[in-house]
Image (cartoon, coloured by chain):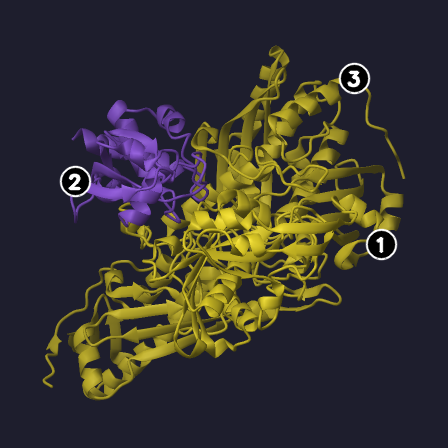
Amino acid sequence: MATLTLTVNGKPVSAQAEANTLLVEFLRETLGLTGTHVGCDTSQCGACVVHLDGLAVKSCTMLALQAEGTEVTTIEGLAPPGSLHPMQVAFHQNHGLQCGFCTPGMVMASVALVTDNPNPSEPEVRQGLAGNLCRCTGYQNIVKSVIAGARAMER
Amino acid sequence: MNTRAKTGTQSSVPVQGGVGQALAHDSGHLHVSGGALYTDDIPEPRNLLHVAIGTSAHPHAKLKKVDLAPVLAAPGVVAVLGAEDIPGENNFGPVLADDPIFSPGLVQYVGQSIFAVAAHSYTEARRAARLAKIDYELLEPILDPEEAVRRQSFVLPTETISRGDSRKALRKALHHLQGKLKLGGQDQFYLEGHIAMAVPREDGDMLVYSSTQHPGEIQHKVAHALGKTSKDIVVECRRMGGAFGGKESQPALFACIAALVAQQTGCAAKVRLDRDDDMIMTGKRHDFVVGYEVGFDDEGRIQGIEFEYAARCGMSADLSGAVNDRTMFHSDNAYFLENVTIVSHRCKTHTVSNTAFRGFGGPQGMYAIEYVVDEIARYLKLDPLAVRKTNFYGTDDRNVTPYEQTIEDNILHELVAQLEASGDYAERRSDIAEFNAASRFLKRGIALTPVKFGISFTATHLNQAGALLHVYTDGTVHLNHGGTEMGQGLFTKVSQVVAEELQIDIDRIKITASDTSKVPNASATAASSGSDLNGKAAQLAARTVKDRLREFAAEHFAVSADAVEFRNNRVQAGKQTVSFTELVNLAFFARVSLSSTGFYRTPKIHYDRKTFSGRPFYYYAYGAAIAEVVVDTLTGEYRVIRVDILHDCGKSLNPAIDLGQVEGGFVQGMGWLTGEELWWNDKGELKTHAPSTYKIPVCSDLPVDFRVQLLESAANREETIHRSKAVGEPPLMLALCVFHALKDAVAAAADYRASPHLDAPATPEAVLRAVDELRARGTAQPERQTG
């Protein structure tokens, strides 16, 4: 066990973590932030994407202790409590979800994508999200959501 | 209480969230904010134990000795359970008792459950499970369906449907083709893996949270395993993170194990499968080998046809009986088969027991007939679409299926004509021929394929549903029904039905978790029937309460019942109107019951399984799609350039949700037929058990140009809920056009002189093999056989 100190969703956190605790386990089990999901356990489906100092990372592939001193944002902290980030609104309004299990990771990956490329084309969104699996939607509405979300983020 | 009735005109504004509106998913705001609770997100009870399952390393073996002492001695371990620790029935099989929870001594696939270990942490349990010392006496496995047919190894008896005299018709036909097709299975790959959490209650009762399409069956199986009865067990499921049929029968194993651990230890217990274990341990879509013989005339009209199916059912029957029945029922797809024999072998192999997956056997039957029709066209050098149309079911004649159901709602002729025009089929086909003539390595292909899919459970008794509805004195509604939410938007649609029926805004309705203590004996949410059945049941529950309110209002306001009208959150009684809430309050004080159940059973259907005849389907859902692809004939790699879909949802309850089902179903079907390859080695081990090796479609695999439309103003001819049609499964089979467009492109690699041998999934490797094989065949024509 070691003490891990970092910022999660804008709040300072200090908690114990085993050397082999994954960041996603730390977020879900220690902090109770269950919006970040585990889909494949092996860093391929993207359901566990969170932001680490503003960059999208798959939290199932990272040790919690590696996040020492960083700022982590999870889906719960993307927008102030009681409100939604424009990308969250876009996914909701454009039906960019069905079962919703991949959605937190999709939204986090999309925000990172649009932060990098504020006005992405459809092909750029399709390429940019190729690391996030969705089994329900066929992606069409996800792409639509990201483009709508990007426009809303510009404003 | 004073009546605050006032006079006024009712609003003609539609109620907010009624049927036909493109509402967002009812949990959408929770999905996007991380607030939607899946089973693994439910706050864990104190002393929760985590469970791992010890599994078989061999496909067929006797367990000579199972030493679990090292497992029990491992750090953090609290309990270890095997077959002898089950107080009740050691079975989770949905139909036959051939699926042991823990192997009692014989293992029949790699990954079969032998024992469970419960520990304080997930990691401790998983580590401990690997410490078992198991001595196996290896037996010879049967690993593929053809071998099973040779050895007569079946989980259920072989079945046959026949009509007319297919032998005689084949002999008499001008042209004759025969062949053998292979098509692969498919993993459901729901993003949320299997999971169950059991929480002991007082007096030996058990609450089980299960990610399941069939809470009622979980309740029964858990009760049987624990040696309890249904009244002692409650199963709840608010939502699943995808299911697609994979959570119809399969969750019972994990729910039973969680409950057994909870019963034995007195602690809550959770089983959550790691993705690899999920893929290794649980059933998938059946892979098939299909033999066919067909006789036809110069126009490609089928005179006689025979199919012989061999399906990999795996080690047990599971749902394979009904799955393979549906394969037989969809061997016609859209085509009239006058003289037909369909033989279906349900092969027992020493691999995981295959199960339900969107389409439930239908896709495999449709794959076979579409393949044959395409072969006929290539043999006759006709446009495959022309041969398809030649064989279409008629509307007034040539309209009886091989199982003797008369098709009364055929809209394929108009639907296909509309798509053909909007998708520029003819023009693109000729452009493609031009392109291919000028392009040496890149070849394009195009195909239009139709879908006709039968709606209803083929087991007639399953076509029933219940709902429970309470109206509270503040005018809000608690709604429950026997269906489950797996992302398909069922809860949203059923809420819309109730909003419409009660004429209240949808935000006054809370739809609640599927719960066996609220609606009993519910069928699985499957067979695309969720909104058809539960929508009707909920409507009837709402109508009962509404009728009571109407009767009360008539009396209270001294008008006739006919003069009471519910409209947009208000109720008009003669010249007076009150709000819905006011009326509810008045009724409450007058001691009117504000709660009701609703029950629905599908009319008209009947079916004799002995003769495979009757009307198994209430109606059919239709659709068609065109795909255009480009193939690199040097590498086998390809892109889907454009897809046009026109799909029939009847009068859609929610066009946004239905469109999502069509798009999602299509892409999932495309995965089945293109990139998703299940591969077992000769030791019976599945080697594609994670997304690293098993490729479901990703965002960049989408058709470059993807045009999806719902057929407008096509009301269901049957009295379904608001004349809508089921939409869960049918769109999956629209993806057959992608496979046939690929086949068309491969054919272009040899100037259409012969038909390629392409099996599904048409991975780039398979496409390259088909190109090479076709070119190696040179210009030789297929052997021409005449009758």
In which quadrant will I find the C terminus of chain A?
top left
Tell me if residue A142 can be seen: yes
Give me the chain that's purple. A
Quickly name the residue at label 2.
A12
Tell me if residue B250 can be seen: no
- B473 shown above or below B535: below
Q: Is residue B415 left or right of residue B590?
A: right
Identity of the amino acid at label 2? Pro
Residue at 61% from the left image edge and 18% from the top image edge: B635
Return the chain for callout 3: B
Q: Which mark is residue B165?
A: 1
C-alpha distance separating marks 3 and 1? 37 Å
Label 3 crowd bin: few (<14), some (14–19), many (20+), radius 10 Å = few
- The picture places residue B75, in percent across and down from the top left corner, at 46, 51
Quickly name the residue at label 3.
B778
Identity of the amino acid at label 1? Asp
- The picture places residue A46, in percent across and down from the top left corner, at 39, 36
Q: Earlier in the sequence, mark 3 or mark 1?
A: 1
Q: Give B493 or B565, whichever is nearer the viewer.
A: B493
The hue in which chain B appears in the rendered picture of the protein: yellow
Residue at 27% from the left image edge and 23% from the top image edge: A116
Q: Give B533 or A131, whichever is nearer the viewer.
A: A131
Q: Give B351 or B123, whichever is nearer the viewer.
A: B123
Identity of the amino acid at label 3? Gly
Same chain assignment for discs 2 and 3: no
